[in-house]
């Protein structure tokens, strides 16, 4: 697992919106909505989903590698249903091609947030949803690692602009004048 570093506090809602906005921008001719919106539309008696469509939902999240910031590190598992009409020519090929394009777009995407890029997990045919009966659907799964909550360093932590090095025993505040910028002595440092 890569080291999880997050610059600003993130919420699931902000990331969800960021994913939808990025998908709308990348695929302007495709309808983008979340799963709840699809279900509300169907509950109201409307079955007018404009196709092709990308239907986003957060399937689960689980504990991730802890950080030193005291935030809750989690791995979000997203599902994106790629939905196309069955009544067009080469319908099976079209839905697979769109699923592949979406998978490529998602992989390593940060969706406008200052977090690690998403990781593509899998794409497969999706036949289990009664709300998508009669449609051609694939499910693209991807994961995103984030930290929730406030960092214990908020307001106190500053990112260093320059790194310095010294050799033992001349280390610590008492020997501050013995420190040299790392880029000046990198070739002299012992290999570890």
Image (cartoon, rainbow, N blue to C red):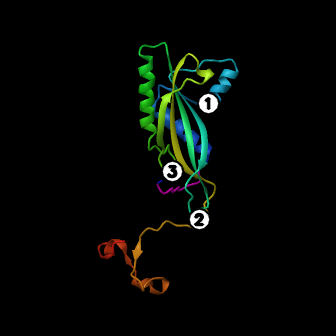
**Start and end of the magenta stretch?**
2-10
- For the residues labelled 1 and 2, the Cα–Cα distance comes to 36 Å
SS at mark 2 in the image: loop
- According to the picture, the residue beneath numbered tag 1 turns out to be 35
Mark drawn on residue 153: 2
Relative image position of residue 159 (x, y in whole percent): 49, 65
- According to the picture, the residue beneath numbered tag 3 turns out to be 115
Relative image position of residue 17 (x, y in whole percent): 57, 39
Q: Main secondary structure of the magenta part?
A: loop
- For the residues labelled 3 and 2, the Cα–Cα distance comes to 17 Å
User: Which quadrant would residue 67 be assigned to in this image?
Assistant: bottom right
Relative image position of residue 146 (x, y in whole percent): 55, 50
Q: Residue at x 57, y 44 (%)?
A: 76
- Of 112 and 128, nearer the camera is 128
SS at mark 3 in the image: loop
Ranked by sequence position, the earlier of labels 1 and 2 is 1
- Of 5 and 169, nearer the camera is 169
Relative image position of residue 26 (x, y in whole percent): 45, 33
Above or below residue 74? Residue 68 is below
Q: Residue at x 36, y 73 (%)?
A: 182
- For the residues labelled 3 and 1, the Cα–Cα distance comes to 24 Å
Please rate how many residues cluster around mark 3, counting C-alpha atoms within 10 Å: few if below 14, some from 14 to 19, many from 20: many
Please rate how many residues cluster around mark 2, counting C-alpha atoms within 10 Å: few if below 14, some from 14 to 19, many from 20: few
Q: Residue at x 51, y 39 (%)?
A: 142
In the rendered structure, does residue 55 fall within the stretch colored magenta? no
Ranked by sequence position, the earlier of labels 3 and 1 is 1
Q: Quadrant of the C terminus?
A: bottom left
SS at mark 1 in the image: helix
């Amino acid at each position: 697992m890569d080291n999880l570093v997050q610059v600003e506090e993130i919420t699931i809602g902000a990331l969800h919106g960021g994913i939808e906005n990025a998908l709308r921008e990348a695929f302007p001719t495709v309808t983008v909505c979340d799963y709840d919106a699809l279900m509300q539309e169907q509950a109201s008696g409307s079955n007018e989903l404009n196709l092709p469509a990308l239907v986003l939902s957060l399937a689960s999240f689980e504990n991730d590698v802890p950080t030193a910031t005291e935030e809750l590190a989690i791995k979000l598992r997203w599902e994106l249903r790629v939905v196309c009409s069955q009544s067009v020519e080469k319908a099976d090929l079209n839905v697979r091609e769109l699923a592949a394009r979406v998978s490529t777009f998602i992989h390593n995407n940060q969706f406008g947030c200052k977090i690690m890029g998403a990781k593509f997990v899998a794409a497969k045919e999706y036949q289990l949803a009664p709300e998508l009966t009669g449609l051609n659907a694939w499910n693209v799964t991807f994961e995103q690692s984030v930290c929730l909550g406030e960092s214990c360093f908020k307001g106190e932590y500053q990112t260093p602009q320059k790194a310095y090095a010294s050799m033992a025993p001349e280390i610590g505040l008492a020997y501050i004048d013995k420190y040299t910028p790392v880029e000046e002595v990198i070739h002299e440092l012992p290999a570890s």
